Amino acid sequence: MGLSLAASFVFLPPELPDQQRAQASKNIVWDQRPAKLPGGGVARPFLWFSAPEGARSKRTVIFFHGNAEDLQLIEADIVQFTQAMKCNVLAVEYPGYGLCLKSKGCEEVSFGGVDDVAIHALLFCCQVKGIYPSQIVLHGRSLGSAPVLTLAKRAFDMFQWEIGGIILQCPFISVRQVAADYVGLAGSLLVPADCYNNMETMRRLCQSPGRSPVPILILHGQLDKVIKPYHGRTLLKQAQDLGHPCIEGHFPANATHNHWSLREDLVKPMDLFIELSTSPTLLGPSSSAASILTP
C-alpha cells in the first residue's frame, strides 16, 4: 500500500450539508503566499483569533485539529480556548476538508498537501502577523500531532527557525501502530512504515544537529479509547531516553479522546508550558532566514 492509498483511510473529512458549509465565519481568513515560497501559490482558509486586549499579544498557538473535524466544527471550541489561554490562535484546515473544497489546489487530501498547509500557516503568522517563530507554539490534536512534528523539523531544516514549543494532545506512535491496536499486527503491516511515523519524526527532531531542543508537552487522557494513552507515554519515554532536556507529560485521569476539562486538563498545563517555552522578548530568527519574514 502506497502513501496515496493510505491517505484515503488516514484522512476522514466530516460530511456536512452544503448549506452549512456555505455559512463561512467572519473569523475565517483566506491567505495566499507567493508561489516562490514553500506552500505558496494556493489560497487557503484559516481561523484567526487575536489575543484578548492587554494579553500576551505576540504569543501564538497554531492549532492542527483531529480527524473528522474542520474549521467550522471547531470554531466554538477555539473561541473558548483563545479566551482562556489569552494568546493568539491560528487554526489550520487540511486539504480536502471543509472550506478547502472551495479553493483550487487544495481540494484533494494528501500528506504532501498537509505539509504545504502547515508551512503556509507558519509563514502567515510570521509574514502577515509579524510573529517570530520563537513565540509560536505548535499544537496538534490526534491526527494533528503528525503535521506538527513534521513542521517543527521542516522549519529548522528550511529556514533555521527555532519554534517556541510543541504540544501533542492524544498523539500516536505511528499510523501503523494505531492500525495494530485495531486489526492486529498482521493487518497493520499493510500500512506503510513511514505513514505518519511520529516516533521516527520525534527521534529526528531530538537528534537534529546544530539546534536547541524544541520544548515539548504531551497531553494524553488516561481514558482515551481511540488512541490509547500508551502512545503518548511511549513518545515521552523515547524523548527522555534520547536526552531531551525539556519534555514533559500530563495524563489527566478523567480525560477521554474527545472530552477534556478545558481549564484543568488543558489550560493549566499549557499556560505554564507556553510561559516557560516561548521567548520573553521578541527574538528574531537567524540572519540567514530573516529575509523570508517579508514576502
Image (cartoon, rainbow, N blue to C red):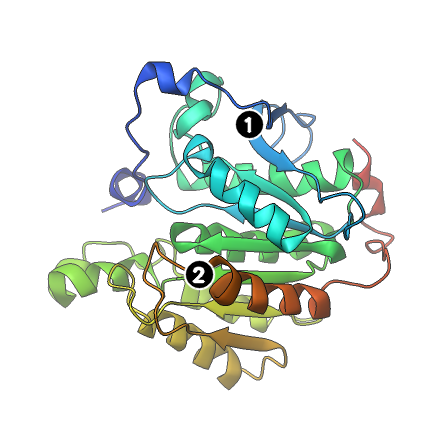
The residue wearing badge 2 is 261
Q: Which mark is residue 96?
A: none
Position of 157 relative to 51 (above/below): below
Q: Label 1 crowding class (10 Å Cα cut-off): few <14, some 14-19, many 20+?
A: many
N-terminal of the pair, mark 1 or mark 2, is 1
User: Circle 1 — which element?
Assistant: strand
Quadrant of the drawing holding the C terminus: top right
The residue wearing badge 1 is 45
Q: Residue 70 lies in what quarter of the image?
A: top left
- The residues tagged by marks 1 and 2 sit, at their Cα atoms, a distance apart of 28 Å
Residue 282 rendering spot, x and y as whole percentages: 86, 55
What residue is at 85 percent from the left and 54 percent from the top? 284
Under mark 2, the amino acid is: Ser
Q: Nearer the viewer, mark 1 or mark 2?
A: 2
Residue 77 visible in the shown view:
yes
Residue 8 rendering spot, x and y as whole percentages: 27, 38
Residue 33 rendering spot, x and y as whole percentages: 67, 28
Position of 282 relative to 119 (above/below): below
User: Circle 2 — which element?
Assistant: loop
Question: In the rendered structure, are the residues bearing label 1 and label 2 in contact, judged by CB atoms less than 8 Å apart?
Answer: no
Residue 88 rendering spot, x and y as whole percentages: 68, 45
Under mark 1, the amino acid is: Pro
Q: Label 2 crowding class (10 Å Cα cut-off): few <14, some 14-19, many 20+?
A: few
How many numbered discs, if any?
2
Q: Image check: 261 left or right of 263?
A: left
Position of 236 relative to 224 (above/below): below
Position of 272 relative to 294 (above/below): below
What residue is at 82 percent from the left and 63 percent from the top? 280
Q: Residue 123 lies in what quarter of the image?
A: top right
Viewer-proximal residue, 192 or 255? 255
Q: Image check: 112 left or right of 228?
A: right
Residue 210 visible in the shown view:
no
